[in-house]
């Protein structure tokens, strides 16, 4: 991913990357990495991630156990060799979905793509009317659609003491109620992308049937 031609990971002093299995650069389990071009920060991080140990028996600072398993480091290093190729496939799939769904603006909205941003589409997300019905329809047709992050962070139990409630962040809440994830990763083919578009168009072409209680 880049912003105005500049790669992510080059902004600020320290940058962190997740290597969760769903990320474009992933490992066989879970992991992450921190990158920096600051020598002082790098020295601190080398100590901090390994209990603060300077040597085997000498604790220089209080640290944590955040060591990446060697096998995971090997996997990530090998994946780096093909990350650009896989990213291009993700971008191709996302752009084709954008095009295929662009005429559904009244009922399904694709994410706005700011100029100067090159996204890698860790998730392809759109906002859909009647999301629950569409999700069920897609799954029934064999499309592995999902809803990621349906509960805004201010409505999570952990944030209860902050005193926020539904209505505190209406834009965020509207997005959480409508957001839908479609598969567009590097293992999805063009034919499958087109099939998804067709299924979504089929769903919204059907008349909405409402049931009214009359007695």
Image (cartoon, rainbow, N blue to C red):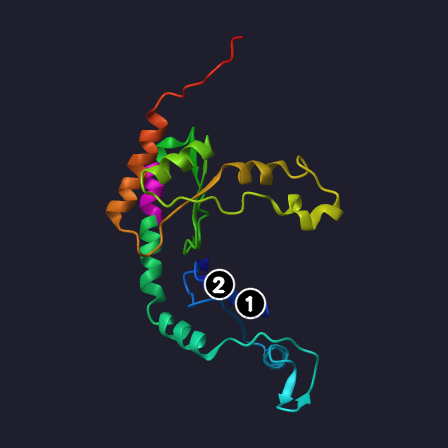
Picture coordinates of residue 182, whole percent (x, y): 39, 45
Is residue 97 within the magenta segment? yes
Provide the residue span drawn in magenta: 94-101
Of callouts 2 and 1, the N-terminal one: 2
Of the 4 image quadrants, the one containing the C terminus is top right
Please tell me whether residue 116 is drawn above or below residue 32 in the rendered image.
above
Q: Residue at x 32, y 42 (%)?
A: 142
Please tell me whether residue 159 is drawn above or below residue 79 in the rendered image.
above
| Horizontal arrangement in the rendering, residue 212 relative to residue 153 (left or right) | left
Which is more toward the observer, 12 or 155?
155
Residue identified by numbered label 1? 15
Distance between the alpha carbons at the discs numbered 2 and 1: 8 Å
Please tell me whether residue 41 is drawn above or below residue 167 in the rendered image.
below
Asked which secondary structure carries label 2, the reply is: loop
Label disc, if present, on residue 8 of the rendered structure: 2
Q: Residue at x 54, y 43 (%)?
A: 150
């Amino acid at each position: 991913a880049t912003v105005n031609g500049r790669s992510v990971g080059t902004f600020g002093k320290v940058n962190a990357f997740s290597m969760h299995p769903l990320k474009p650069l992933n490992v066989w389990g879970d992991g992450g990495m921190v990158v920096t071009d600051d020598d002082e920060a790098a020295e601190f991080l080398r100590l901090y991630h390994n209990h603060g140990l300077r040597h085997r028996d000498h604790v220089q600072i209080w640290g944590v156990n955040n060591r990446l398993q060697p096998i995971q480091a090997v996997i990530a290093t090998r994946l780096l060799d093909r990350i650009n190729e896989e990213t291009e496939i993700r971008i191709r799939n996302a752009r084709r979905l954008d095009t295929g769904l662009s005429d559904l603006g009244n009922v399904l909205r694709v994410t706005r793509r700011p100029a100067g941003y090159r996204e890698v589409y860790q998730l392809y997300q759109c906002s859909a009317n009647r999301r629950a019905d569409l999700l069920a329809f897609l799954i029934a047709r064999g499309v592995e659609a999902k809803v990621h992050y349906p509960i805004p962070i201010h409505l999570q139990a952990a944030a209860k003491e902050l005193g926020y409630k539904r209505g505190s962040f209406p834009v965020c809440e509207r997005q959480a109620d409508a957001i839908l994830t479609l598969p567009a990763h590097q293992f999805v083919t063009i034919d499958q992308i087109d099939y998804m578009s067709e299924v979504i168009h089929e769903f919204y072409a059907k008349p909405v049937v409402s049931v009214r209680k009359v007695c």
